[in-house]
């Protein structure tokens, strides 16, 4: 392996870890009794439309970064549909918010990304 390959691998790993950290903040950051792990997506999503849209934009950044890292369009499209479904779930008052908390779209997408690059999850 050349120095360039090692540097590219290190850069990709750094970027993957950053994506995983953002996904963790969105889906799993806080422990809430009864609900379990909840992230900013579940909490900010309680603010109708604006909250769900803000977290969906952050989730969309994860999808865009996956494409920039070289994931195939088909997998990226599946990830985008996951984000869209999560956004739609969150738009339904209360019940949608509870379902949104359980769905964990960002965690799903991070698993897809790491699996594609054959990297262990952090």
Image: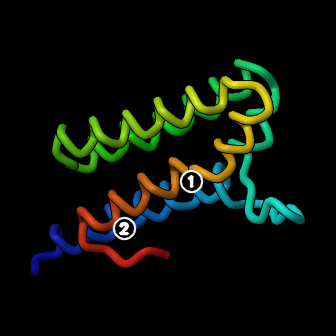
Name the residue at 73% across, 27% down. Answer: 51
Question: Residue 49 placed where, x, y %?
Answer: 70, 18
Of residues 32 and 13, the one drawn nearer to the viewer in this rendering:
32
Element under label 1?
helix
Mark 1 highlights which residue? 23
Q: CA distance from mark 2 to mark 1?
A: 15 Å
Instruction: State which quadrant residue 14 falls in.
Output: bottom left
Element under label 2?
helix
Say which mark, if any, is on residue 38.
Answer: none
* Mark nearer the N terminus (2 vs 1): 2
Name the residue at 11% across, 76% down. Answer: 2
Classify residue 117 as left or right of residue 105. left
Q: How is the image coloured?
A: rainbow
Using a 10 Å C-alpha cutoff, classify the residue at mark 2 as few (fewer than 14 neighbours), some (14 to 19) or many (20 or more). some
Mark 2 highlights which residue? 13
Classify residue 66 as left or right of residue 35. left
Q: How many numbered marks have been drawn onto this rendered protein structure?
A: 2
Name the residue at 23% across, 45% down. Answer: 75
Question: Residue 24 placed where, x, y %?
Answer: 62, 59
Q: Residue furthest top?
A: 49
Of residues 36 and 117, the one drawn nearer to the viewer in this rendering:
36
The N terminus appears in which quarter of the rendering? bottom left
- Looking at the image, is 49 positioned above or below residue 9? above
| Of marks 2 and 1, the one in the foreground | 1
- Looking at the image, is 16 positioned above or below residue 78? below
Name the residue at 80% across, 59% down. Answer: 35
Classify residue 45 as left or right of residue 73. right
Classify residue 3 as left or right of residue 63. left
Of residues 38 and 55, the one drawn nearer to the viewer in this rendering:
38
Can you see residue 11? no
Question: Residue 116 placed where, x, y %?
Answer: 24, 62
Using a 10 Å C-alpha cutoff, classify the residue at mark 1 as few (fewer than 14 neighbours), some (14 to 19) or many (20 or more). many
């Amino acid at each position: 392996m050349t120095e360039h390959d090692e540097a590219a691998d290190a850069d990709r790993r750094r970027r993957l870890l950053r994506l995983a950290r953002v996904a963790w903040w969105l889906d799993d950051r806080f422990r809430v009794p009864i609900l379990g792990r909840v992230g900013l997506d579940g909490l900010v999503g309680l603010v109708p439309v604006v909250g769900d849209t803000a977290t969906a934009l952050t989730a969309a950044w994860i999808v865009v970064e996956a494409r920039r890292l070289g994931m195939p369009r088909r997998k990226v499209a599946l990830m985008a549909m996951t984000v869209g479904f999560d956004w739609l779930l969150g738009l339904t008052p209360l019940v949608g918010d509870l379902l949104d908390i359980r769905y964990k779209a960002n965690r799903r997408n991070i698993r897809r990304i790491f699996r594609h690059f054959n990297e262990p999850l952090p």
